[in-house]
Amino acid sequence: AQKVTQAQTEISVVEKEDVTLDCVYETRDTTYYLFWYKQPPSGELVFLIRRNSFDEQNEISGRYSWNFQKSTSSFNFTITASQVVDSAVYFCALSGSNTGNQFYFGTGTSLTVIP
Amino acid sequence: DTEVTQTPKHLVMGMTNKKSLKCEQHMGHRAMYWYKQKAKKPPELMFVYSYEKLSINESVPSRFSPECPNSSLLNLHLHALQPEDSALYLCASSTGQGTFSPLHFGNGTRLTVT
């Protein structure tokens, strides 16, 4: 079974603080991909990153960084020096090779950055 | 700006109306998707078209009828909807089903059924 858990429903931080969004996944597939999406109030889901199951190298893109650990089945997302524009709902998603490559979304974490 | 365009942005319809949602992409993607999203929930998959053929129908009621006229266009025809069908309807595309490519979403259509 495929499952993505985002235990943090809502997070509020003050601008310039760092914040980490947690994502824990379950899968029996050996080949799978993990994704993060951002959904601002406008509604569009914006693709942020994709990581495959064979690449545990962490990635940094500007103020964003991702920590993938297969040992704990986690793919956490950190925003450094948060800004008001980071306020959005963030979804973690999983796509596996044995489930028709369907996307399984977590329940999302609503991030509010307070100016 | 999104590369997947959805129209209309907002739609209010009565339970006896017939309306259509439209989606267009010009990225050469061969898979297109309809998702339904209720407030404070993740997107739920409704339909998948792969190479213009319906490949997945997630047991969606027949009052929702998808159509893929060509590789760039995707429609969702609505008829006799219920108030609980009010939601954000998102269209997405990817290079191909089964390729692990990311989904590219449109801005969505906010549908209200009265």
Image (tube, helix red, strand yellow):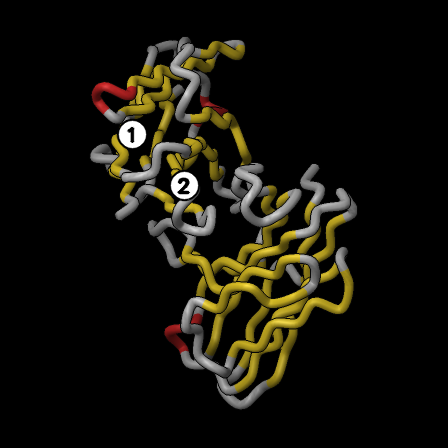
Q: x, y percentage for residue A37? A: 47, 34
Instruction: Name the residue: 61% across, 70% down.
Output: B76
Q: x, y percentage for residue B81? A: 48, 81
Q: Residues within 10 Å of mark 1 (few under 14, many from 20)?
A: many
> Based on the displayed image, in which of its 4 quarters is residue A54 positioned?
top left
What residue is pinned by disc 2? Answer: A96
Q: x, y percentage for residue B89? A: 52, 60
> Based on the displayed image, in which of its 4 quarters is residue A3 positioned?
top left
**1 vs 2, front mark:** 2
Q: In the image, is B81 to the left or to the right of B108?
A: left
What residue is pinned by disc 1? Answer: A23
Callout 1: residue from which chain? A
Q: Is residue B72 above or below residue B84?
A: above
CB within 8 Å, label 1 to label 2: no
In the depicted view, which residue is nearer to us: A40 or B93?
A: B93
Q: Is disc 2 placed on a helix, strand or loop?
A: strand
Distance from disc 1 to disc 2, alpha carbons, whole Å, reads: 16 Å
Q: Amino acid at mark 1?
A: Cys
Q: Is residue B48 above or below residue A75?
A: below
Q: Is residue B67 above or below residue B44?
A: below
Instruction: Name the residue: 71% across, 46% down.
Output: B29
Task: Tell which circle, 1 or 2, labels the residue nearer the N-terminal end.
Answer: 1
Where is the C terminus of chain A found, in terms of image quarters? top left
Do pointers 1 and 2 mark residues of a single chain?
yes
Q: Amino acid at mark 2?
A: Gly
Instruction: Name the residue: 48% across, 68% down.
Output: B57
Residue at the bottom extreme, as displayed: B16
> Based on the displayed image, in which of its 4 quarters is residue A114 positioned?
top left
Q: Is residue A58 above or below residue B3?
A: above
Q: x, y percentage for residue A21? A: 31, 24
